[in-house]
Image: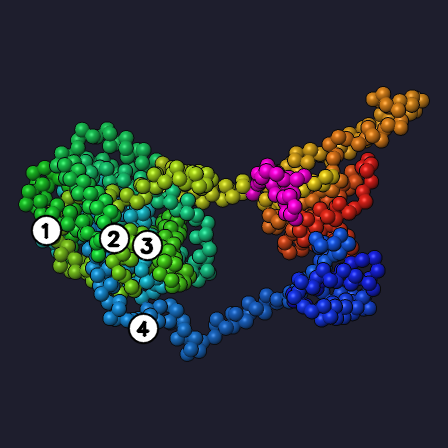
Amino acid sequence: MLGSLFFLSTANQKTRFATWHNLFDIFHLPAPTFIFRLFKEHIHEVNTGTMERPLEATRMENTTSACVLMERKTHVKINRKQVMLAKLRKSCSCTPQKLKNFLMDFLPVLQWLPKYKCKEYIWGDVMSGLVIGIILVPQAIAYSLLAGLKPIYSLYTSFFANIIYFLMGTSRHVSVGIFSLISLMVGQVVDRELLLAGFDLNDDASPSLGDGSLQNDTQSNTTAFNLTIAGMNAECGKECYAIGIATALTFVAGVYQVLMGIFRLGFISMYLSEAVLDGFATGASLTILTAQVKYLIGIKIPRSQGYGMLVITWINVFRNISQANICDVITSAICILVLVTAKELGDRYKHKLKFPLPTELVVIVVATLVSHYGKLNEVYASSVSGAIPTGFIPPKVPPFNLMLRVAVDALPLAIVSFVFTVSLSEMCAKKYAYSIKANQEMFAVGFCNIIPSFFHSFATSAALAKTLVKTSTGCQTQVSGVISAMVVLLVLLFLAPLFYSLQKCVLACIIIVSLRGALRKFRDVPSRYHMNKVDTFVWIVTMSASALISTEIGLLVGIVFSLLCIIVRTQRPRTALLGQIQDTNFYEDDLEYENLCSVPKIKIFRFEAPLYYANKDYFLKSLYRLTNLDPNLEVARRKKYEKKEKRHLKKGDHTTANGLGTGETTLQLVPKQTDFQALVVDCSSILFLDTTGVNTLKEILKDYKVLNISVLLACCNPSVIDSLKRGGYFGKDFGSMQEMLFYSIHNAVQFAKDQKLPEDCSV
């Protein structure tokens, strides 16, 4: 009956409808209809002596003798075994329609490409694709320094990632490809494994001259080693082994992502809060900046490995600062000045520019020409990129023997790659009013790693900067990704050798300037602290651990610390005594609001957290402190006093231990602290109870009952009520439930006022 069955309770069950007129307005029904429905249903229950469904009691505010019983819906028990079997049969069945749906879901391009509006979308997609392609080329070459690999592999990565995401991605705007943070994580693993294999990490040796062909580059950059590494006997050089590690790491990370998609483990990303991600990105940015300093000033120092890389690198930089290459220092200063100025002007006048200025490409072209014709490598020993081969290397299966060595490293890489991609996809989808499939994004990113790993590519992810550029230049669909891939392909096939004379310090400048957004997070610390102090501490801890220890450890520390903050906040939540707002039926915190009225003889206690094993003691301590009464201590005090009285009476002394007459003993037994007769617990903020929580409420019910203080629960949600029922809080037959559980605080207060409690509350 309108979702709930209400009936009134008086002394006689047959005359429960004396105050029915108070309920007409609630249901907006004519009086006869309401009375007939209510009377008919209630008489049936009275005559049969049974209730068709379990009822729960609360108190109404309109009348002191009225009680409202709310009917709970009966939930049909689900046979989970049968449901699982049905789902399994459905998923294992194969029909043409189901096969078609699977293919359409697995390759979303088949859904949206036939509906592509060429006249509306093509111009924006072509423009954004060209701009992103122009940005991708210099960034790909630059980020190869972070990954510890040759520039050609970065170009491969950018090409294949755009093609595969075009086929499998559900976001229209996100830009997937090489990303500085992912490149750093790959580079750290590559450097560690190279060091363990006995290779020299110094990559500043003068490159051999060549015609830019693939064969010459492969021969000139490979020093033969007879190695037995991870179970494989092979003659493999440093470059060969480095790309083998990178592809093995990428393949395993992709497998993890696909498995997470199959088992629908995308919820893992929920544990990476915004504060953790921002702190992780900022800490990693400091590590990236530190790794590029040696290229900026042209000194040759070993690439630091292990924990504390940032500190060790800076120590080595200052120790070798006297060896700085003046040519690299001047070039770096000019490039940073030009790049930062162009970026600032672009940000200031972006509303007037139809597309961002290709500053990186201009800097690279000019710097390459100056380096080539000025012979900076030969005259000033400035380190240059070296020969970049053209064409594609034949595909090769990632070395499975190396996968076990990098299996642990691939897990954080897979999670970070997925989280950044899904976060950016959701941001774009929300902004442009369409939906994405997070699980399909997991598959898309996973295959963006698995398939390219066979083509000498390393891990990819969505990148914020390129995504923002993509949206600002009119991107409509992932057709723009194909255009970007074509630009990269043009460089791969024809233009790559032209970057031979490009100085590494120029690439380092491009990387450092691209970190502006992450490094600007330091400016947001005061406003972040003002908004939420706990999130600020999470950001600081994550950033510090990522920078000072390592990126992987920093991410783990950030997750653990943020979870600990949540646990601590539920262990020591806010507690308060409530007062009544004048002339209303509402109650609020006495310490937070002025002009609240205390309710005589009644204490109203609020606990703003779930009640479970970890905060049970804090719940009791807060309750005893705020009510100024510990029932256990009070009972012990009274028992001790009674023993003293008995000893005096046995001696024939008619005066008490305090010099009072026996007639005054009762007053002496009543402590000054017991200034209330009822305790109302506001359960509106208690989300759930575990076994310890139920036992805690039963404990205070028992302890206060000894002092003749009634405990009333108000505003309990259905989950809490069910836990109390299962825990036996209301007794075996729930007979006292109507006198212990109330729909609102005011109902409980009115009930407590109507109770005829004796003025003497002694034991």
Q: Residue furthest left?
A: 373
- Sooner in the amino-acid sequence: mark 1 or mark 2: 1
Q: Quadrant of the C terminus?
A: top right
Pick whichever of labels 4 and 1 is earlier in the sequence: 4
Say whether marks 3 and 2 touch (CB < 8 Å): no
Q: Is residue 176 above or below residue 557?
A: below
Q: Give the residue pinned by disc 1.
A: 210
- Residue topped by disc 4: 115
**Res. 51 image quadrant:** bottom right
Q: Which residue is mark 2?
A: 351
Mark 3 or 1: in front is 3
Mark 3 or mark 2, whichever is nearer to me: 2
Q: Which residues are magenta?
A: 570-598
588 part of magenta stretch? yes
Q: Tell me what residue is drawn at x 60 percent, y 48 percent.
A: 685
658 is higher (above) or lower (below) than 372: above
Secondary structure, mark 2, is loop
3D distance between C-alphas at marks 3 and 1 = 33 Å
Q: Residues within 10 Å of mark 1 (few under 14, many from 20)?
A: some
> Alpha-carbon distance for marks 2 and 4?
31 Å
The residue under label 4 is which amino acid type? Answer: Lys
Viewer can see residue 649 = yes
- Which of label 1 and label 2 is nearer to you? 2
Under mark 2, the amino acid is His
Residue marked by disc 3: 461
Q: Badge 4: how crowded within 10 Å, few (<14), some, or many (20+)?
A: few
Q: CA distance from mark 1 to mark 2?
A: 46 Å
Circle number at residue 9:
none
Residue at image x 28%, y 34%? 313
Secondary structure beneath dot 4 equals helix
Amino acid type of the residue tagged 1 in the rendering: Gly
